[in-house]
Image (tube, rainbow, N blue to C red):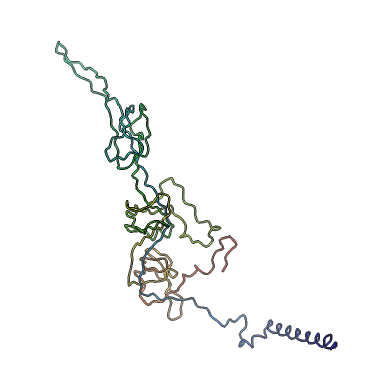
């Protein structure tokens, strides 16, 4: 037994390792070609072909979902229409007013033209007249609640000075747009559907408008690749925003978060392709039509309609049933490393 343990077993173990080593060397230096049917590493047995997709008929609904905020509509500033001293404040902060309601009275001096008098000898002379005091009433230019009074009694004001502000007491929803969303909402719908988490049932938000950055505003910061390394250029904020008016009977409060859904058109029974097969998503694009004879794909311009982010409507340039490359050439071959270490993939 001692001979088996100390002599026979170690000898068998060495023989097994020797066989394994010889086999690995044989495979590494070309011996495995016979096992693989004569194929070597320089002669791959599989030829990869780009995936294809066929243009088919379908429907596209351009629905865009945004994250917004409920905002109080800004107050309207009321400016003085006369120069002089404030003689009376006709309202207090918190008063409800209508258009034309008196807010502030300003005592001003009104210049009067010179008076012509006839003397006893029949000649005429010009006599200057003293200015007369006139009360100018500054009135509300909109309905709402007086949110502030910017003047005091006996304060001197000039034409154009702000004397009060009237808040409409209404709410709006505002949501920022990315590049992709702004292109998809070139023609926004007349109303949006707004959901306030934890609040009432979804309601229609009317008077939808697209706002653009005012001149002088700072440009929005691009997407930080270290915060979101895989975000595309379409995720960059533009500074533009969608706003809509909250109906008076909707229960909402300024500062609350709101989910905004806009449906900007539906196209039914149209030719569609995946967006991955088209370079471009607005008005015009390019696709690569597959050559049935096996030649190189043909770059082909097409007209584009609605998109839902996954499919895009092809309005012209491509017939139903035509096969195209599923992925735009060159855009998926090597992704750039967002951390600057070169391509990977």
Residue 76 occupies which quadrant of the picture?
top left
- The image shows residue 168 at horizontal and vertical percentages of 33, 44
Residue at image position (32%, 70%) is: 268
Of residues 13 and 222, the one drawn nearer to the viewer in this rendering: 13
Residue at image position (33%, 66%) is: 266
Residue at image position (60%, 62%) is: 341
Of residues 139 and 218, the one drawn nearer to the viewer in this rendering: 139
In the rendered image, the quadrant that contains the N terminus is: bottom right
The correct choice, above or below, for 224 with respect to 38 in the image is above
- The image shows residue 333 at horizontal and vertical percentages of 52, 69
- The image shows residue 300 at horizontal and vertical percentages of 40, 71
- Left-right relation of 207 to 234: left
Give the farthest residue toward the top.
Answer: 121
Residue 86 occupies which quadrant of the picture?
top left
Of residues 93 and 265, the one drawn nearer to the viewer in this rendering: 93
- The image shows residue 69 at horizontal and vertical percentages of 42, 52
Give the farthest residue toward the right.
Answer: 2
The correct choice, above or below, for 199 with respect to 327 in the image is above
The correct choice, above or below, for 119 with respect to 134 in the image is above
The correct choice, above or below, for 4 with respect to 302 in the image is below
In the rendered image, the quadrant that contains the C terminus is: bottom right
Residue 277 occupies which quadrant of the picture?
bottom left
- Left-right relation of 335 to 256: right
Number of numbered discs visible in the structure rendering: 0
Residue at image position (63%, 88%) is: 35
Of residues 307 and 335, the one drawn nearer to the viewer in this rendering: 307
């Amino acid at each position: 037994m001692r001979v088996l343990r100390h002599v026979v077993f170690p000898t068998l173990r060495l023989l097994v390792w020797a066989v394994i080593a010889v086999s690995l060397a044989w495979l590494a230096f070309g011996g495995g070609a016979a096992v693989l049917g004569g194929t070597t590493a320089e002669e791959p047995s599989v030829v990869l072909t780009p995936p294809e997709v066929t243009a088919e008929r379908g429907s596209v609904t351009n629905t865009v979902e945004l994250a917004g905020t409920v905002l109080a509509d800004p107050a309207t500033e009321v400016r003085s229409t006369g120069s002089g001293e404030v003689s009376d404040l006709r309202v207090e902060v918190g008063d409800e007013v209508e258009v034309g309601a008196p807010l502030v009275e300003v005592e001003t001096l009104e210049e009067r033209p010179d008076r012509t008098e006839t003397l006893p000898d029949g000649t005429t002379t010009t006599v200057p007249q003293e200015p007369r005091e006139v009360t100018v009433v500054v009135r509300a230019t909109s309905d709402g609640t007086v949110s502030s009074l910017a003047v005091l009694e006996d304060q001197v004001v000039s034409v154009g000075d702000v004397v009060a502000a009237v808040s409409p007491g209404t709410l709006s929803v505002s949501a920022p747009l990315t590049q992709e969303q702004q292109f998809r909402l070139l023609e926004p719908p007349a109303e949006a559907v707004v959901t306030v988490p934890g609040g009432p049932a979804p309601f229609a938000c009317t008077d939808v408008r697209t706002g653009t950055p005012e001149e002088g505003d700072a440009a929005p910061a691009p997407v930080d690749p270290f915060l979101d390394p895989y975000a595309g250029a379409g995720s960059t904020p533009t500074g533009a925003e969608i706003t809509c008016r909250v109906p008076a009977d909707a229960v909402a409060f300024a500062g609350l978060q709101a989910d905004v859904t806009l449906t900007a058109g539906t196209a039914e029974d149209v030719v569609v392709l995946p967006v991955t097969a088209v370079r471009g998503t607005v008005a015009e694009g390019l696709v690569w039509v597959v050559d049935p004879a096996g030649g190189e794909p043909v770059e082909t311009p097409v007209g584009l309609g609605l998109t839902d982010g996954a499919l895009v409507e092809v309005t012209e340039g491509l017939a139903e049933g035509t096969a195209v490359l599923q992925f735009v050439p060159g855009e998926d071959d090597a992704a750039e490393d967002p951390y600057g270490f070169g391509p990977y993939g």
